[in-house]
Amino acid sequence: MRAWQYVLYACGQVGMMCLARFFFQWNMEYAREPVSDGFLLAPALFGLVLLGFRIFDGVTDPVAGIISDRWVRRGRERRHLLLFAFFIPVVGLALVFRPDAAMSPGLRWGLATVGLFIFFVGYTVYAIPYWSLVADYAGDDHDARRRLSNCLGTGMLVATAIIAVVSPAIVEGSGYFAAALWVGLPATALMVLPFFAQPRRAPVAPPSGPEPGLGEMLAIAFRDRRFLAVLVLFSGSQMSFTVMTLGSPAIAKEVLGGTVGDVPKLLGPFLLGAFPVFVFVPLLSRRLGWERAVVIASLALGVVYAGTRWLDDTGDSPFVRAGLLFACAGPMAAVLLGVEGEAVTTCARESKGELTAIYFGVLNLIVKAMNGVATLLTGVVLEQERFGLIGPLAGALLWVGVAGYFALRPRRQPAPAA
């Protein structure tokens, strides 16, 4: 693959994650907008409805994987599924942020609920086939697989930076609905571009043999011990990211004596530390192997996160010290995000290469469930006002993930004697 094809592929992740980051950054603030009868959308009830849709979203991930893999087994190109789905999430995003104070409560809730359904369905039916293109576009080229996987991690952090920098000014100047369109329409255009990233190579014949049933597809994934070990490993890293994302405002405000507006002083150094390292992630994966790279990065990131326990608001520059520490976390996060797609694709191809999408679907299902647990744990820490435990909790989750990986991974068989 050529450089421009990798760029086109990465654009899909940037676009999709811009939509997701905008949604998750602003939905609760939007729900809390004051109106004459209280709030625009009762935050507690909206949070409960959102939880229900998150469960629904997780359950539909394997279903989308099954549909995607069956599409390929029937001799069709997976990338064509993107053309059926790329425009759906932005419709849902616009509907979620469309209610205003002039509408009746019933109309506001109706628009928001329909929007949530369309958004999560659209996100799933686009994301699972899109991520699975790592296997389709790379084929047996391990270097291409590493680079495509790295594109996913890079795209995620690029989207995070865009939303953190751009969206506050648009929301403040134009309102939530206009901001959703200003962000959503360019992001949607980016989501079409991976379709054109396919490299020129001889067509690959679809898998032969009988088509496995739904239960058999799931059973293949859950019987794969190496994949289960990888699930535990990346569950630990994703849970740690969730804890730090939710806990960063408390660290900025309660630990460092700043305000919520100071969160970019932590996020900025983190991103600056991560972006340069993405250039070297494929090389690191090739030299160390993706499993060893993830284990080392997880252990090191756990140490850095645990180091936030000793941050405080004393001295002249608490945010400088905190920024330096978060900058140290960036490189390890780049490795974890950049290698995830390679790890899942490799496991799928070693077991049943035609089931790549179902492996991604199962990964999303488990990670989303574990992120719910991470959210609960973070809520307990915040409610108890033990703000200094946020970082150590994130670090502990990383270490638990590594321990679970070593407990579950299959033992390598010794090479047969000559």
Image (spheres, rainbow, N blue to C red):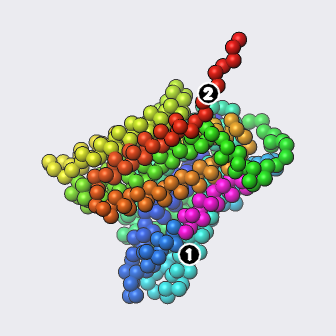
Q: Label 2, secondary structure: give it.
A: loop
102 vs 121, nearest the viewer: 121
Residue at position x 71%, y 11% in the image? 418
Residue 190's spot in the image, x, y percent? 57, 54
Residue 331: name its quadrant: top left
Q: For this view, does 77 lie left or right of residue 172?
A: right
Amino acid type of disc 2?
A: Arg
Q: Which residues are magenta?
A: 52-70
How many numbered badges does the structure rendering display? 2
Visible in this render: residue 78? no
Residue at position x 40%, y 87% in the image? 37
Q: CA distance from mark 1 to mark 2?
A: 49 Å
158 is within the stretch colored magenta = no
Residue at position x 82%, y 49% in the image? 211
Instruction: Name the residue beneath numbered marker 1.
Output: 113
Residue at position x 54%, y 84% in the image? 107
Q: Which badge, 1 or 2, is on the more N-terminal residue?
A: 1
380 above or below 178? Answer: above
In the rendering, which numbered label is found on residue 412?
Answer: 2
Q: For this view, does 9 lie left or right of residue 416?
A: left
What crowding class fits label 2: few (fewer than 14 Cα within 10 Å), some (14-19), or many (20 or more)?
few
58 is within the stretch colored magenta = yes
> Can you name the residue that lies furthest to the top here?
418
Secondary structure of the magenta portion, mostly?
helix
Q: Label 1, secondary structure: give it.
A: helix
Residue 35: name its quadrant: bottom left
In the rendering, which numbered label is found on residue 239?
Answer: none
Residue 290's spot in the image, x, y percent? 54, 33
Amino acid type of disc 1?
A: Thr
Q: For this view, does 220 lie left or right of residue 38?
A: right
